[in-house]
Every structure is written in C-alpha cells, then in structure tokens.
Amino acid sequence: MDTLINAWSLANYLIVQGFGLVLAGAAAVVFLYIVLRKQHSLRNTVLLGLFFIGAMLFFWFPVGVPKNLAYPFGLTTYGPADGPTLPLKNVFQFFSHLGAFERVADIARDARDVPAATGRTESAVVNIDLTTKEVLAEIAPGVIVNYWTFDGTVPGPMLRVREGDTVHVTLHNDHTSLHMHSIDLHAVTGPGGGATVTDVMPGESKMVTFKALNPGLYIYHCAHPNVANHMAHGMYGLILIEPEEELPPVDRELYVVQGEFYTAGSRGTKGLQVVDAGKMLDGNPEYIVFNGKTGAISKENVVVQQGEKVRMYVGNGGVNLVSNFHLIGEIFDTVYPEAAIGSEPHKNVQSTIVPAGGATIVEFSADVPGTYVLVDHALARLDKGAWGTLQIVGESRPDIFEGIPSTYPSGH
Ligand SMILES: [Cu+2]
C-alpha cells in the first residue's frame, strides 16, 4: 500500500478535522496577545477580547467542544454503554500498528461457501472455533478499510448445526487485535446470546455452550460495546439451525449477507479509510455491499445450471438499513419470511424484507439462461454497492422468455 496515501489519510483524519480547530484557536489567542501588547488600550483590549470570545462561540459550539479527545468531536450519545467515538490514542495506536495488521487480498466470503447439511437424524455435541481478527482490505478498488472480522472475511463463516444439538462456540481473539470482541448468536437462548460470557481480550479465548432449541437462520455478531461500531466494521455472519424435520432438498445453496460501511472519506476516496461514527449514527453509509465489498458476488463465480433449485441464505448485518432483497428476472418460488423455519413459507414473492440483525431464506428454480442481478431494491443503494450477479447456464427457453437482447447497457 502506498505510504504517502496512508500519511495523507492520517493527516486528513487528525489534522484537518481535529487539530486544525485547536491550532486555529491557539493561533488566534497568540495573535490577540501580540496585538494587545502593542495597543496599550483598555477599550481595544475589551473589544478584541469580546470579538474573540464571540467568534469562538460562533465557530466552536456547532462543532462541539472536544470531549476526552475522542473522534468525532462533540458527539453526544444515550446508549447503554460508551458511544461509537474513538479515543484519539486508539487512532494513534491504529496508525502506529498498521504494519501488524494482516492485508487480506479478498475480504469477501464466497457466496458458494455454505457448509454441507449435517445429514444427521440425531442431536449431537458440536464444537465451533471462531477467531476475531482485525485486518486491512479493499472495499472498492483502491479504497482500504480496517475490517474487524470473524475468521478474516465478511461475513464470517456460515455455521450449521441441527435443532437439539449442544454447541460449544470457542471465540479466540487474535493477538494482533487492538480491541476486545465477543459473540452474540441470535440462535442462543441465554443472556446476551453468548456475548456476556465471550468478551475476549486480544490473544485470549472464551467459550459459550448453548442448546439449539429453535430451528431457523440467525445472525451472529460481535456485541462488544460500542456494538454498532463493531458491526459496522464487518463483524457478523449467519448460523443455520437445521430443523429436526429437514428442509426440502435443493441442488445449490448460496450465502449472502448485506452490510453498511461508514467511511470518513466520501465514497470512492482512495487510500485507508477510518469509520465516521457521526455518519453511522445518522444512518448514511458511504458503502452498502453484499459479502463485504463491492462486486463480491459475481457471475464469474456463481454459476447455476438450468433446472437447478437454488436456496439462498440471506442475512443483514445492518447496522441501520432494512434490506429489500430482490433477484432481477426471477421470482422466489418459496420464501421463509424472516427465516422463520416452522412457519408456513410464502409462495411467489418478488422482494422480501431482511431486517437489520435478521435473515431470510429464499428459493428459486433456474429456468432461463442469462445473467441475473441480486439487489437491495431500494435502488439508489445499487450505486453504493448493493448488488451482485449470478449466471444461469443452459438452453434457451423461448416457451418462457423470448426477445432480441438490447445492445444498450442493461437497466432494470
Ligand atoms: Cu468486536
């Protein structure tokens, strides 16, 4: 990575936005002192003093008085724990440890990376190991983000157990981490979904044991305060609790998780980006992506054979937006709304809601060959990255779809 770009990121982050304000204030005080020493006039001293105080009130108050040297300045929050601001010492620590972070060539978890069905008819004891790791990777070409991950990808690995299983989840926090992490699995019945017993320091490990009482597809995520901030760094994934009575078999399964990223630099700004907690509180992400980065799910990799029945496990890490999941040119034959396995599934659905911190299961049959685009159908989000493609290969089916393809770039 270009050292100059990193240096500029640091300068922009700290000097321009933070210390610039302090420097301006200090320079103004020195300037006034020099002027007043030359004036020897009480009237001018009072006037200039009032002018200075007025100017400071006018410029500084809207920005906020720096509190505990935390970034962004002047952010007041009312959550149950600390807000999402970063102490400046953490920012310095981050930049001084840049060399220690692993550079991941591809942060995206492959959409095809779905664990095989347990195939069991009896419950069992299952051991799962996860490692929280803070890494650097591209969210878009040339745009570097400090991701906090489960097992080095976003989303973390999809987990799969069976209803009635006893599950031991051991959470390791990599020694290179700067922060504590934990895990809250929405499949857990118990305090914090496991988070209250898995707060781990860098280099340490802790275990939670739970009984998988309820079948379904559940989000898991880091729940160390500030929880939203940890999730906005990429700390989420899905766990499937297979029902005792198996779901109908399909030919292919896919794993997709939507998430938002709040970078301080505006969308497309190259170089290392830090999180902007103010944008996160306002719910205005610079990037909305499937599986961790723009372009992560592509038809080059996700190839479906005509005639196959496809099931997609879809989650939403949020932290603010509800996804309106849609596959352009397909109709979901079956949807388990909110991933509620056990309820009667919906039939013939176009778009389905995936709540922040929730999931859905959709199924479709691959009938007509071509490229298909999966989207969050709040379509302005496409331009923030919320789309991917898959390909159906096979013989044309003029009985279902016929026409001459346009030579213009395809819209919706
Ligand atoms: Cu965390």
Image: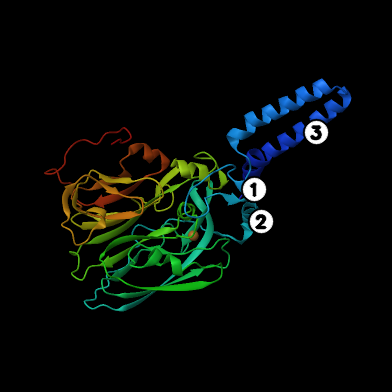
Q: Amino acid at mark 2?
A: Ser
Q: Which residue is mark 1?
A: 69
Q: Secondary structure at mark 1?
A: loop
**Label 3 neighbourhood size at 10 Å, few (<14), some (14-19), many (20+)?**
few
Q: Which residue is mark 3?
A: 30
Q: Secondary structure at mark 3?
A: helix
State whether label 1 is within 8 Å of ligand 1.
Answer: no
* Residue situated in front as seen by the camera: 351 or 385: 351
Marks 3 and 2, how far apart in space? 32 Å
Residue 209 location, x and y as percent?
A: 38, 74
Marks 1 and 2, how far apart in space? 18 Å
* Horizontal arrangement in the rendering, residue 50 relative to residue 291 (left or right): right
Of the two numbered discs 3 and 1 on the same chain, state the one appearing first in sequence: 3
Do callouts 3 and 2 mark residues in contact (Cβ within 8 Å)?
no
Q: Secondary structure at mark 2?
A: helix
Q: Residue at x 41, y 61 (%)?
A: 156
* Residue situated in front as seen by the camera: 81 or 345: 81
Residue 258 location, x and y as percent?
A: 37, 50
* Residue situated in front as seen by the camera: 175 or 342: 342
Residue sitting at the far left: 399
* Horizontal arrangement in the rendering, residue 361 relative to residue 8 (left or right): left
* Horizontal arrangement in the rendering, residue 328 relative to residue 203 (left or right): left
Q: Which residue is mark 2?
A: 96
Q: Quadrant of residue 19?
A: top right
State whether label 3 is within 8 Å of ligand 1.
Answer: no
